Structures are given as structure tokens and as C-alpha cells.
Amino acid sequence: MSIDLGILLVRVLFGGAIAAHGAQKLFGWFGGYGIKGTGGFFETIGFRPGTTFAALAGLTEFGGGVLLILGLFTPLGAAAVVSTMIVALVSVHLKSGFFAASNGIEMPFLYAAAAVGLAFTGGGAFSLDAVFPVKVLTEPYLVIGVLVLAVAGAAAVLGMRGQPRQEATTT
């Protein structure tokens, strides 16, 4: 019982944080910039057209977060988070080291790690997965396969990335 409560707590808080990140990109909520503003940033880091990649990232984060909150198809929601966090880690944070204080990989790394953990634990007893059990979703081979596809998806997105723009300097 306490394990299931712990999984519920992690799912709701973590999924809520991820969904909020997606809502920033999609809707401009919570201090975000919406698709157009986020798309402009994505253009600067080599993802063109920026608005397409911003919408893709926002939908993946928002959708993955909502699936985690609900505990519905938990491994799939977790895989969506893993995929976007790999892209963020490589394209934005890797050059800055580990710690978040210097915009390093710490946060996307921890988000991806938490998502992998939830992919293997499943949604727990207090989830829609428990109400509508699809037993195949709890099989370790399927979870591994879904996570491998998430990594492949991230690699494909990173493969579409162009050169980041050089920022203009004024003298």
C-alpha cells in the first residue's frame, strides 16, 4: 500500500511538472513563451522550422505528463518524457556541465531517470492502468522496447537538427 502511495505521489508531482513544461511551450502558460516564442528559441539551437519542433516538444511533454498523472499507459508516458529529455540534454544543456546552476544536464538527466523508474514500476494500484489492466504493459521486455524506441526517437530528432545560429555580437 505505501509503495503504491509513493508511486502515486511521484506520478502526480513529476507528471504535473512535465505537463507544465509542455504547457509553457504549447500555450504560453506558467511564464512560457508559447509555440511561436519557443519556436524562435528552437531556431537558434538548430531545430528548423522552430515552431514545428516547439509543438512536437510541447505535445510530447504535455501528453507524457498527463499520461503519468493519470497512470494511463504509464510506460508510454514515461518514454515520451525520456525522449524529450534526451533531446533537451544534448541540444541545450550538455555544453554547460552537470549542475543546474550553470544550466547543465542535471534536471533533464533526473527527469529522464525518474521517467525510466516509472516505466518499470508502472502506474501502481492508484492508476488508470490498474483499472483497465493491459498486462502486456508491465512486461519488462516491452518496457525496455518502448524505452529503446524513445531513445531512437530522440536520436532521430537530434539527427534533424541543423547548426545552431551564431549570436550576433555588437562592438
Image (spheres, rainbow, N blue to C red):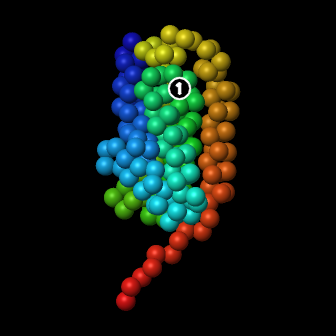
The picture quadrant where one finds residue 163 is: bottom right
Q: Residue at x 50, y 10 (%)?
A: 131
Q: Quick one: quadrant of the C terminus?
A: bottom left
Where residue 169 sits in the image (x, y, percent)?
42, 82
Which residue is the extreme one toward the left? 31
Where residue 112 sits in the image (x, y, percent)?
50, 42
**Residue 88 visible (yes or no):** yes
Where residue 165 sits in the image (x, y, percent)?
53, 71
Q: Quick one: quadrant of the N terminus?
A: top left
**Residue 105 visible (yes or no):** no
Q: Residue at x 37, y 62 (%)?
A: 102
Q: Residue at x 40, y 43 (%)?
A: 27
Which residue is the extreme one toward the front? 36
> Which SS class for mark 1?
helix
- What type is the residue that disc 1 sits on? Thr
Q: Residue at x 48, y 16 (%)?
A: 128
* Nearer the observer, 33 or 102: 33
Q: Say how many tags the image has.
A: 1
